Amino acid sequence: MSEGSLVTVKKVEEIFTHIVHSIVPLTEAKDRINRIGVVYEFQIPDFTNSARTIFSQFMKIDLTGIQDNMLMRISLKNPAIESIINPDKKSDYKNVILTISSEREKDENDVEESEEEERKERIPTILKISSDYQVYYIPQRSLKNVNINKHLSEAGSYIESAIKKIPLNVE
């Protein structure tokens, strides 16, 4: 890519698809695909306290005074549509791991411990949201029977929908 070109999600998906179709056929795995997955991760900067924000707005719990350090992971497993339609031949399922975490931006200044709490309140935090969207194939499939574009589209739709449902009023 040229120095001025913009890397977009769409471009990364195109590269991923090209790599899969170029590399996997060179291996013995091309006829034994049992899983395909993609991870989308987003970072939202400039929260005063992203852990408190997420707990109070998303979880509806008021945790005033908590440390700004949080990790929440949710795993959801659902049968794929093909398994519901034809359960005798396929047992495919989708697994989504949604992770929401918070961390402080790095502060290079060394400060005495007595000033530590006051300093922490001024350091912005970053909210990270990631979605690991996987489809498991039972029985295994040949690569030619795996629709990578459909998988990427479903994964993208899922993360867009999840982000829209998370209230992000920055404190």
Image (cartoon, rainbow, N blue to C red):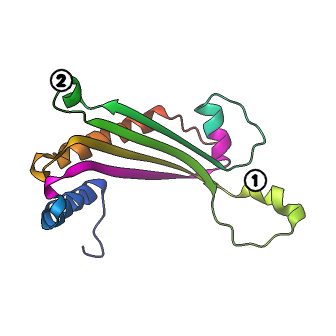
Q: Main secondary structure of the magenta part?
A: strand
Secondary element type, mark 1: helix
Please rate how many residues cluster around mark 1, counting C-alpha atoms within 10 Å: few if below 14, some from 14 to 19, many from 20.
Answer: some
Residue at 63% x, 61% y is 105
Label 2 belongs to which residue?
Answer: 85
Residue 114, percent across and down?
90, 62
Mark 1 or mark 2: whose residue is earlier in sequence: 2
Q: Residue 158: which quarter of the image?
A: top left
Residue at 25% x, 75% y is 2
Q: Amino acid at mark 1?
A: Glu
Marker count (numbered): 2
Q: Residue 93: which quarter of the image?
A: top left
Q: Residue 27: which quarter of the image?
A: bottom left
Above/below status of 26 relative to 168? below
Residue 39, percent across and down?
37, 51
Residue 123, percent across and down?
70, 58
Considering depth in this image, is 35 or 3 the residue closer to the camera?
Answer: 35
Secondary element type, mark 2: helix
For this orientation, the residue located farthest to the right is 114
Residue at 16% x, 25% y is 86
Quadrant of the rendering where the N terminus is positioned? bottom left
Residue range highlighted in magenta: 30-53
Q: Is residue 41 magenta?
A: yes
Cα gap from disc 1 to disc 2, whole angstroms: 54 Å
User: In screen coordinates, is 24 left or right of 103?
Assistant: left
User: In screen coordinates, is 97 left or right of 67?
Assistant: left
User: In screen coordinates, is 17 left or right of 107?
Assistant: left
Label 1 belongs to which residue?
Answer: 121
Q: Amino acid at mark 2?
A: Ile
